[in-house]
Image (cartoon, coloured by chain):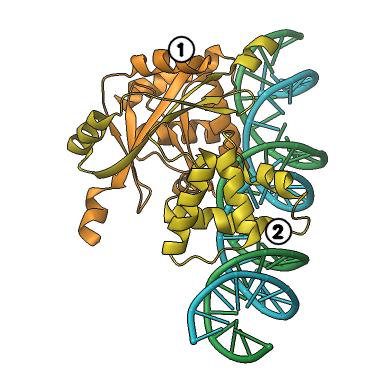
Chain colours: A yellow, B orange, C cyan, D green
DNA sequence: ATCTCTCTTGATAATATTTATAAATAGTGT
DNA sequence: ACACTATTTATAAATATTATCAAGAGAGAT
């Protein structure tokens, strides 16, 4: 599964005229392998074994690139670090208010909300974001 | 309306044992008067006529206080400044992706989502956040 | 009205995340 | 292998927010 997704992503990048580099490849495959919605710092630490000299700027640059091409989604959390999700399928997130862990869940897409919001506000609505907050299973035990 | 809400808020603070100060009063009443979900900087600029020496730290401190007491809600947007909403009634937000403006809208509360998410993820869900993104009326014209 | 205790303010430094800059490096097509 | 250009690295800068602490000001007791 992951291997196929990586190939698809690489093709997409090639078609977009994006040059492939070892760092770029490593960041992308790490994102596709993990389900953990990592932060920049987590990616940095995970790859410093393979790339001891990699700059954090490289990670930021590539994540923005992947975002622009439509390969990853950025999840922002106020002043806390953003998290990055390479799972572009239709899903939502549950965020732990204690440890920050993010877990996926599915729910029938809220197309009604976008229509309703558009009528109500006059906005030309293009997307929405839904998250639930609470304690993850680990943090429930520890409290 | 606003006057009543201010009284209610002041009572709530007094009951919580919070000391009243001119700055605190000004920030709170400004938040209750405006419907614009202001940032810290906007609050700062709006009040510098009355309080030329007010520190931004004072605004941050008081907003956190109001948040803890349950008088305002913080809306976070990644690396951009947070916005603050003193309307604690049940509603959602439409955010303009061009100018950042936030407009309220109403929608039948998504209690189902929280239940579904809880079952799906094992989280003990306490709240949710829903936002729609798009172009506000002004920015639609200018594009 | 004044005293006193304690909380708050204001000024500034510190922290953290992200972006900008520029020289060195490395892809990729020819 | 060459040359052109994008990318990486290292570092500085920008931005938002929090921490620190001395000075100032509420509010209840006297």
Mark 1 lies on residue: B119
Q: Do marks 2 and 1 both belong to one polypeptide chain? A: no
The quadrant in which the C terminus of chain A is found is top right
Is A91 or B102 nearer to us in this picture?
Answer: A91
Direction from residue B2 to residue B68 in the image, left or right: right
Identify whether B58 is placed above or below D3: above
Q: Residue at x 17, y 36 (%)?
A: A119
Give the letter of the chain under mark 1: B
Figure quadrant of residue A41:
top right
Is A17 or B45 nearer to us in this picture?
Answer: A17
Residue most extreme to the left: A119
SS class, disc 1: helix
Q: Residue at x 54, y 12 (%)?
A: B15
Give the image location of residue C22, x and y in percent.
Answer: 67, 79
Mark drawn on residue A55: 2
Give the image location of residue A53, x and y in percent.
Answer: 77, 59
Q: Residue at x 78, y 49 (%)?
A: A49
């Amino acid at each position: 599964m992951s291997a196929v997704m990586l190939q698809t992503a690489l093709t997409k990048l090639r078609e977009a005229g994006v040059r492939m580099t070892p760092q770029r490849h490593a960041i992308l495959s790490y994102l596709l392998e993990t389900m953990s919605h990592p932060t920049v710092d987590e990616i940095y630490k995970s790859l410093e074994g393979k790339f001891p000299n990699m700059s954090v700027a490289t990670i930021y640059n590539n994540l923005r690139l992947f975002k622009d091409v439509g390969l990853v989604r950025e999840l922002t959390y106020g002043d806390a670090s953003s998290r990055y999700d390479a799972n572009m399928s239709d899903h939502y997130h549950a965020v732990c208010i204690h440890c920050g862990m993010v877990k996926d869940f599915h729910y029938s897409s809220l197309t009604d909300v976008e229509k309703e919001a558009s009528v109500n506000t006059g906005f030309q609505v293009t997307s929405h974001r839904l998250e639930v907050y609470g304690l993850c299973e680990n943090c429930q035990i520890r409290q």
